[in-house]
Amino acid sequence: MFWLERPPYLRWLAAATLVAGAAALDLAGAATTPFPFVAVPLDRGAAVTPEDIEWRDVPVGLLGEAGQTSGVATRPLSPGEPLVAGAVTDSVAIPAGWWAVPVDLPYGAAVGTPVRLIATEPPLDVEGIVAQPGSTGTFATPVPGLVAVPPETAGAVAMASGTGRLVVLVGA
């Protein structure tokens, strides 16, 4: 007799549990964390300050590790772009009137490191400051870094660097 069979209580309980669990997950929402985003357009080498950044909540782990929120932009940054690791580097105050010259820097030369630039032709012995470390570009091609030098020696440093006759000594 079909009408005397016990109702499927366990199936009803499993279905109710599944619906309640799905509703709880949907109402709980995803875990979020504040993440820095660029608020204004920034050119490569521009100073990044806390006023140039807006904080937005994003799901945890969506964008990886957050980058620095102050320093110097390593590439052009557009408004709304997330500040991920490597987009901003430590800044160094380049003395007023000095010039930043592209120079092949040794590995490990960090921003703010004092360097001594020596060349035989033209005769040159200049002290400078690493303004931006070198890096490795596409296909592992080296990208020169920038060294800030006094204005009276900037031309000689540029010529020596361009001809490959510049030796860079890195200070402590």
Image (tube, rainbow, N blue to C red):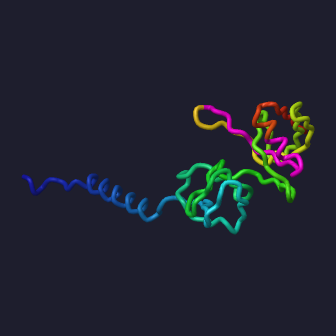
Q: Which residue is drawn at 79% across and 49% down?
A: 100
Q: Position of residue 73 (x, y in %)?
A: 68, 54
Q: 167 or 63: nearer the eye?
A: 167
Q: Which residue is drawn at 69% across and 53% down?
A: 88
Q: Residue at x 62, y 49 (%)?
A: 65
Q: 84 or 171: nearer the eye?
A: 171
Q: In this view, does 48 lie to the left or right of 95?
A: left
Q: Relative to residue 171, is residue 9 depicted above or below?
A: below
| Residue 170 is covered by the magenta coloring | no
Q: Where is residue 41 in the image (x, y as percent from the top left)?
A: 61, 63
Q: Where is residue 99 in the image (x, y as percent from the top left)?
A: 81, 52
Q: Where is residue 63 in the image (x, y as percent from the top left)?
A: 55, 52
| Residue 144 is covered by the magenta coloring | yes
Q: Relative to residue 26, is residue 163 depicted above or below?
A: above
Quadrant location of residue 39? bottom right
Q: 123 or 13: nearer the eye?
A: 123
* Image quarter of the C terminus: top right
Q: Residue at x 65, y 58 (%)?
A: 43
Q: Relative to residue 143, is residue 67 depicted above or below?
A: below
Q: 77 or 151: nearer the eye?
A: 151
Spot the residue most to the left.
Answer: 1
Spot the residue most to the front.
Answer: 122
Q: Which stretch is magenta? A: 140-158
